[in-house]
Image: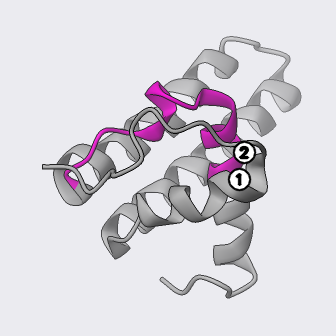
Amino acid sequence: MSHDTTHGEHFANFAEFYPFYLNEHRNGTSWRLHFVGSLGVIGCFAMALATGDWLWLPVAVVCGYDFAWIGHFFFEKNRPATFRHPLYSLMGDWVMFKDICIGRISL
C-alpha cells in the first residue's frame, strides 16, 4: 500500500527529510489537496485575527490535516509522515506550499 521505504529512519535535519517528504507526495491531486488545506489554514488564521474569535485556530488545524490526509489515504495510498515525523512534516507542508506558489512544483 505504501511506497514508504524509510519507515523508522531518522533524519539528521530537515534538508535530509524534505526529499523523503516529496517522495511521499507524488500524486498531483494530493498536492492540490495539501495546497487547498494550507490556504484554508491561512484563511482561518486571518479570520481569527480579524474577528478576535480564537475558535478559528482549531478549525485551522482540522482544515489543514483533513485535506492532507484525504490526499494520503485516497490518492497517495500511504500513511502521512506526520505520524512519524510531526515537526518535519509540518515544515514540509509549508515548504511544499511555497514551492507550489513559486512554481518549483507545478499543479
Residue drawn 12% across and 49% down? 1
Q: Is residue 46 left or right of residue 92?
A: right
Count of number-bearing discs: 2
Name the residue carrying label 2.
91
Q: Are marks 1 and 2 in contact (CB under 8 Å)?
A: yes
Residue type of the residue flagged with mark 2: Met
Picture quadrant of residue 33: bottom left
Of residues 67 and 59, which is closer to you in this image?
67
Residue type of the residue flagged with mark 1: Trp
Is residue 72 positioned above or below 104 on the image?
A: above
Q: Is residue 59 left or right of residue 12?
A: left
Disc ID at residue 94: 1
The question of residue 87 being in magenta is answered with yes
Q: Main secondary structure of the magenta part?
A: helix
What is the secondary structure assignment of the residue under circle 1?
A: helix
Picture quadrant of residue 104: bottom right
What is the secondary structure assignment of the residue under circle 2?
A: helix
Q: Is residue 40 left or right of residue 4?
A: right
Of residues 40 and 16, which is closer to you in this image?
16
The part of the chain drawn in magenta is 77-94
Disc ID at residue 30: none
Is residue 28 positioned above or below 3 on the image?
A: below
Residue drawn 66% across and 21% down? 56
Residue 35 percent location from the top left of the image = 54, 60
Picture quadrant of residue 46: top right
